[in-house]
Amino acid sequence: MTETQPVTQHIDRSSTPTERALAPDLGRGLMLALIAIANVMIYLIDRPYGYRQHIVEDGAANHVVSTLVVTLVDGRAFPLFAFLFGYGIVQLAGRQRAKGTADAEVRRILRRRHLALIVIGAVHAVLLFPGDILGWYGVVGLLVVALLGRGDRALLTLGALWLLPASIVVGLIYSRPAPGDDRGHFWSFEVADPTLTLGLRALEWVMSPFGLLPVVTAALVGVVAARHRILEEPRAHRRLLRRVATGGIALAVAGGLPSGLVVGSYLSTPDGTVAWLLAFVHSLTGVAGGLGLAAGFGLVAARSSQGRRRALIDALAATGRRSMSAYLFQSVVFVALLTLPLGGLGAELGTATAAGLALAVWAVSVLVAALMDRRSVRGPAEVVLRRWSYRPARVEPRSGRKGH
């Protein structure tokens, strides 16, 4: 592929669920487990907050799980999501062009799709979860669409240049040095007044992207990977996938473990420059971890494609095809069980129990998605997004005056 060859010429001709590449859907399905674990921790309240705004608590199990969550999940799940998101944009554009859709119409569909994500994200944030990522990924999607005509080198260079300042900002956000009784963000979780909660959620949603700035880099890498069909043809790219999986995950563990040990109370809480440095390195290596996880899913897909597919793999892929519905389902359950006006369990559960709850909710979503897949039923959120995206353009009536 030449440097100036546009992304849109790399066409994924699959259009039906049975013909779709396994790896991206498998990755999205497994990714939702990590996102559930990351999100559920935000619901835990009524205890002092320590480094990276995790609750400070006792118990060996809670300390171990806190360490694992910060090392392996925090700042790693969302870059994985962003990589798959950027990858999916290229897949969608390719499928449309395979049907003969004109370039201008493809871009219109993509823009409508990402504007719809922003709207859905806003509703999700205000009503359920202010840490919503759909709105921010809608913004990232609009950026990616604007850059689709750029070559690989330009996108990778832009991603690399963006990563450093983005990680510096995230480091500043998460480097609060000392524990305290007050939250540094997401204050709405400690408010029982519904009216005040809605207002705070809207504010928190607007603030949330500042902690997710590095995902832009992962999304741009996803675009380049999709151009070369890395996940559609994982067996042909095994060597690359192994290197990225091994190196990316190793970097993520090395960069995340120091912060994990602090949150798990195995190391004393740093302050000043050291606190920022730990948070900066944690963010920087999180992008490598997200890419490493995506490569690992590609290797799993390559192995699965060699023989008979297992029911679990198919169920995870079915969840990936309904990833937005499953993501919103998590928020509904978490709000019902954990928030103050309703179940209120967020004030009682420890980190270990909360992680178990998150995995249980994710497992239910996998089961439901598998049942829906057997009946060829799309996810409800995906149906709404599809209808919004493919709504025909409005044609302005002509004036009817001759000579004009």
Image (cartoon, rainbow, N blue to C red):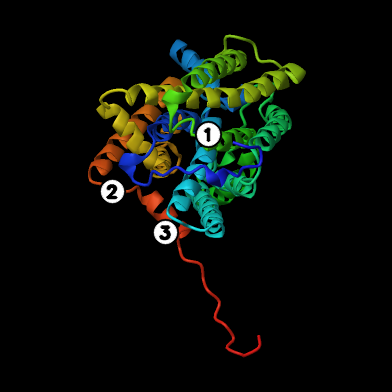
Q: Is residue 249 left or right of residue 149?
A: left
- List the residue tagged with mark 3: 387
Residue farthest right in this picture? 273
Residue at 27% x, 43% y: name it.
Answer: 372
Helix, strand or loop for disc 1: loop
Along the line of sight, the residue nearer the viewer: 65 or 321 = 321
Q: Is residue 4 above or below residue 181?
A: below
Amino acid at circle 2: Val
Q: Position of residue 143 (x, y in %)?
A: 63, 47
Number of marks: 3
Q: Position of residue 313 (x, y in %)?
A: 31, 28
Q: Is residue 278 above or below residue 330?
A: above
- List the residue tagged with mark 2: 377
Along the line of sight, the residue nearer the viewer: 335 or 14 = 14
Front tag of 1 and 2: 1
Measured in 3D between alpha carbons, the distance from the residue under mark 1 to the one under mark 3, in whole angstroms, is 29 Å
Label 1 vs 3, first from the N-terminus: 1
Answer few, some or many: residues within 10 Å of disc 2's Cα (few below 14, many 20 plus, some between 14 and 19): few
Residue at 62% x, 31% y: name it.
Answer: 182
Answer few, some or many: residues within 10 Å of disc 1's Cα (few below 14, many 20 plus, some between 14 and 19): some
Measured in 3D between alpha carbons, the distance from the residue under mark 1 to the one under mark 2, in whole angstroms, is 31 Å
Helix, strand or loop for disc 2: loop
Residue at 48% x, 50% y: name it.
Answer: 127
